[in-house]
Image (cartoon, rainbow, N blue to C red):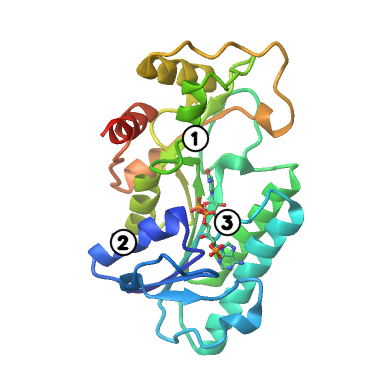
Amino acid sequence: MKVLIAGCGYVGEALGHELLALGDTVICLKRDTRGLGREISPWAADLTVPSSLMGLPADVTAVVFCAGARERSEAAYTSTYVRGLENLLSALGSAGAELERLIFTSSTAVYEHEDGRWVDEDSPAEPTARTARCLLEAEAITLRGAPRASVVRLGGIYGPGRAGLVERIRSGQVTAPGATLYTNRVHQDDCAGVLAHLLHAESPPPLLLAVDDCPVDLSELYRWLADQLGVAAPRASDSAPRGRFRTSKRCRNARLKAMGYRLRMPSFREGYAALLQEAEA
Ligand SMILES: NC(=O)c1ccc[n+]([C@@H]2O[C@H](COP(=O)([O-])OP(=O)(O)OC[C@H]3O[C@@H](n4cnc5c(N)ncnc54)[C@H](OP(=O)(O)O)[C@@H]3O)[C@@H](O)[C@H]2O)c1
């Protein structure tokens, strides 16, 4: 398979190496390709500038879109996820590429429930946040964009280089929310693993939640981390969480399991334990 990874950052680069190991040919597109290994064929282009996308190879058969908007605003989301995706599909169409597979990395942020309920791929996503609505728009473009297209809604990504929470807990800078708030997490290794697994699946589902087995109350996660670090558990805030920080839902990963994917980091415990060990080493 010749795979174009559009927006090759934290997840995209890990995916690139995963796919190379599976024998795929990989092209990694981003604006600043310095620092990318030559083996994943860096391709410098800006998804928001159609002219920069001219000359893409016609023999690309699969695209994984995992560019990230530079800020959480409607303008940035529209530009990156909606226009960026449209520009890319149009450029590949003009190049004569015939996509067999197309994957868009969306987010569990499209579920805005606040009551800790379980959600899965069949649960309605009716976000009020404009940013989340942009994600839904890009999801719809994806599903029209190739015969076997899939949307993957990722939970909160963490892993090597994204362990700021650990340092903030260590230095006592974190306050626990004054309410039960579930967080759904997925390790970088599983982001790459799930996307590669999906790309190679015989019958890929159109929608997949990619989260670990263990939605966890934020306060419990903070206490667990504090315990591992041997520091005091963060104190609870006196005020109720506001805005997007109020959302609380538990995402089910049954469909992912049914596809035969085995999580490398089934919960925050394995994932953060690996990070803490690496930091010690
Ligand atoms: N972080 C999370 O917890 C989380 C949760 C759910 C879903 N997601 C989604 O998962 C995806 C992957 O996340 P990530 O953490 O890997 O993101 P990331 O590290 O921020 O990487 C995104 C990459 O996109 C590239 N990019 C951004 N705008 C671009 C443009 N206009 N043209 C070309 N390339 C562009 C950036 O490289 P250049 O700056 O060099 O162009 C960057 O390397 C994103 O879609 C994100 O929204 C993230």
Gap between marks 1 and 2, in whole Å? 24 Å
Q: Residues within 10 Å of mark 1 (few under 14, many from 20)?
A: few
Which residue is under mark 1?
Answer: 164
Residue displayed at 51% across by 64% down: 7
Q: Nearer the viewer, mark 3 or mark 1?
A: 1
| Residue type pointed to by label 1 | Gly
> Which circle's residue, 1 or 2, is located before the other in the chain?
2
Q: Is residue 192 visible?
A: yes
Q: Where is residue 55? Give x, y as percent.
A: 52, 88
Determine which residue is flagged by label 3.
68
Find numbered disc 2 in the image and state the secondary structure of the residue it sits on: helix
Q: Which residue is mark 2?
A: 17
Point out residue 26 in the picture as x, y percentages from the top left corner.
35, 72
User: Camera-side residue: 188 or 173?
Assistant: 173
Mark 1 residue element: helix
Q: Quadrant of the N terminus?
A: bottom left
Q: Nearer the viewer, residue 86 or 269?
A: 269
Q: Residue at x 71, y 60 (%)?
A: 78
Determine the CA span between mark 3 and mark 2: 19 Å
Q: Would you say the beta carbon of the disc 3 residue lies within 8 angstroms of ligand 1?
A: yes
What is the three-letter code of the residue carrying label 3?
A: Gly
Q: Is residue 39 above or below residue 251?
A: below
- Amino acid under disc 2: His
Q: Secondary structure at mark 3?
A: loop
